[in-house]
Amino acid sequence: MTDTKPRAVRRLGDIVFANLAFFAGVSILATLATVAAFLFAQSVPAFTGPPIDAASEGFFSYVLPFVFGTVYASVIGLAIATPLAIGIALYISHFANRRFAQVLGYAVDLLAAIPSVVYGLWGILVLAPFLSPTFNWLNENLGWIPIFAGQVSATGRTMLTVGIVLAIMVLPIMAALIREIFLQTPRLHEEAALALGATRWEMIKMAVLPFGRPGIISAAMLGLGRALGETMAVAMVLSPAAVVSFAVLTSTNSNTIAANIALQFPEAGGNYTNLLIATGLVLFAITMVVNMVARWVISRRAEFSGAN
Amino acid sequence: MNNILKLGALAAVSTLVLAGCAANEDVAETPTSAAETPTEAVVELAGTLNGSGASSMAAGQEAWIAAFQIANPGVTVNYDPTGSGTGRAQFMEGATSFTGSDSYWKDEELLEAFPSCEPGTMPWEFPIWISPIAIIFNLDGVSSLNMDGATVAGIFAGEITMWNDSAIAASNPGVALPELEITAVHRSDESGTSKNFTDYLAKVAENVWTVGAIEAWPVEYGGEGAQGTSGVVSAVTGGNGTIGYADASRAGDLGTVAVKVGTDYVSYSAEAAAAVVDASPLVEGRESYDLATKIDRNTTASGAYPIVLVSYLMGCNDYVDDAQAELVRAWASFLVSEEGQNAAAASAGNAPISAGLRAKAQAIIDAIK
C-alpha cells in the first residue's frame, strides 16, 4: 500500500517557507525566554545584596501595593471598556449601515494608534480637571460606598481617572477583535433565530453573543494585558502612594508596577535597580497568569474557538 | 503631488542650510570670548568628551555644550542625563570623563578606585549648578505668602490642612485666606528636588518633619504625587488650593512662598540662592580640591534663600588619558566662567555661582593633570 502512495514533492520554496515560519514561531519563545532569564538574573541581587531603604520591610510588603494597584486599575479599566467595546462591536457588525460602519471601524482603529504619552497628557491636562466636579458629586452623594469615600482629590488625578484612561486605551483593540468575532457568527444561526420570531436584540442574545463569548473573553484578556503593562499614561496621571487603597477619588492611590518602575528607575542606583526589576518579574508573572486563565476559559468552549 | 513634495524638500533643505549658516555666524561673532581663555587660544582642541549624571542640570548642559562646541569645533561633548546615582556609578566604572551629580561623593565611594584617574589619585568636585527650589501655590487672588519653616513642614506633613490655619494667617496679616483644603503636591518620582526640599524641612523643623531628607514620599504624610517638575507644576496649576515645590525657573505665574530666614522673609532669587551656598560650610575631612558643601538650611545670613539644589561637577585630578585631561580642563573652565554660568542661567533659569566660588573652582581646574 505504502509503495503505491505518491510521494509528496518537496519543492525548494516549500522548504524555505516552512523553515522561515518555524523560526518565526521559535523566535517568540526565544524572546520570551530571554526576557524571563534577564528578569530572573537581574532580580537576584535585590534579595542577596545589602538592604534597600525603599524596601526596608522586605520585598513582598514593598511590591504588594503595586500589585494591588496594577490589578485594580486594570480591572476598573476593563469594567468600563468591556461593555463599551461589546456595544461598539455590535453596532458596527449588526446595526450601523455598511458605509458608516466602515468609517466607525477606521475611527476605532485610529484610537489604537495614539501613543500612550499622548493619552497621559490628555488625561492630566483635560480629563482630570474635567472629571473633578463629577468626583465631588460622587463623593457627596455616594460617599457612603467605600470606594467613593475619603478626601476628594483637588486635581482629579485619581485611580478612577486612570481607570477611564486605561479603558479608552484598551477600547480599540477590544472593539476591533470583538467586531471580527461577531461578524463570524454563522448567518444560519442568525436567520434561524429571526425565523423563529426573535427580535433583533433577541437574535443577538441567542445567536451572536453565545457564539462570540470566547472571543469577548480573549479580547478582554488582551485588553487586560495591555492595561496591566501600561506605563506612561499611569505614571503621568496617577497621584501615587505606596498603600493598598480601594478609594478611587482620593490623592492616595496604589501605584502600578509598571508606572512605579518608570518613576523610580531614572534615579535608582545599586541594587535598588534590581529591586525594581524584581517587581517587573512579578508583573511578568501576573501577565502570564492572566493569559493562562484566559486560555483555560477559552478552551472550555473549544468548539467555537479557532485559537487552539 | 510631485511638485508639492519637491517644494517640501526644498523648504527642508533650505532650513538646514540656513541653520548651518546661523551656527557659523555665531563662531564669527564670538572670537573675543574664545580668545580670553588661554588654553583655547593656543591649541585647537579636538576629541570627544563623555559625561553623564544629574538630569537637573540637563538644560544647562545643553546650553554649555552648544556654546562650547561652537567655540571649539573639533570637540564633541556628550552629556547623558542618566540621574546622579547612575552618573557617579558610570564615572566609577571609567565609562565617562566627568559627572554631574546632585549630591557630593559619598565617603564610601571615595574609597573605591577610579579607573579613569591615575591610580592613587582622587576625583575633584565643586558646585557648578545652583537651582533655587520655589514653593509654588495656586490660590485665587494671592500671589505671595510668608511662611516659616515649621509652617511649610506642617503643610507638607499633612498637619496643617486648611489655608486659613492660624499658622499661615499669623505671618500674613492683611491677606484674605479662604477656608479651603490644602492639597500638597509632591514628586512621585525620586528626585534631588524632593531630597533638598525635605532636607530643608528636616533641618528647620525637625519636630514637625521627622523623617529626614528623603526622595520617596512617606505614605503617612499623604498629599498628592505628580511625575517630574512638569507634573508638579501642572498639578498645582490645575487644582485650587494646591501647593507644591519645583525648580524656581518653572514657577511661572504661580504664587510663591517667601520663607523665614533669621527675622526676614526671603523670596527665591538667583542672588539669594548663590548667597546660601557661600554662607554654608564645606564638608569636613575632605581634600582641598573637594568643595562638597553642607548647605546650611538654618542660615541666618541676610538675603540668603535656603531651599536650593546644588549640583556638582566631578572629574579626575590626574587623568590616565592626558588628552582627556586637556579637554576636561577646557570644558570645566568654560562651565565655571562667568560666560558659561550666564549662558546656562539664560537658558535654564538657574542661579549662577558666585565670583568667589568661581575663583576657587578655577584653581582646582588649573591643577588637573
Image: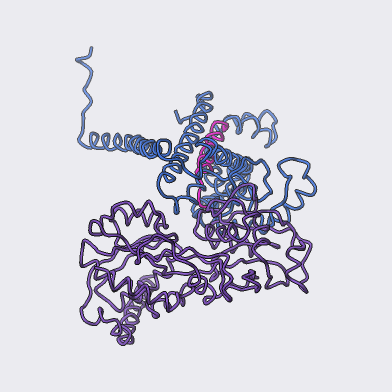
Chain colours: A blue, B purple
- Taking B36 as reference, is A2 left or right? left
Image coords of residue A202 (percent x, y): 68, 33
Give the residue at the far front of this rendering.
B285
The foreground one among A282 and A196 is: A282
* Res. A102 visible in picture: no
Look at the picture and state if B343 lies above or below A164. below
- Taking B172 as reference, is B280 left or right? left
Q: Tell me the quarter of the image containing the C terminus of chain B.
A: bottom left
Magenta highlight: main SS: helix
- The residues colored magenta run A212-232
The foreground one among A268 and B171 is: B171
The foreground one among B8 and B84 is: B84
- Taking A227 as reference, is A2 left or right? left
Look at the picture and state if B342 lies above or below B282. below
Look at the picture and state if A126 lies above or below A301. below
Image coords of residue A31 (percent x, y): 35, 39
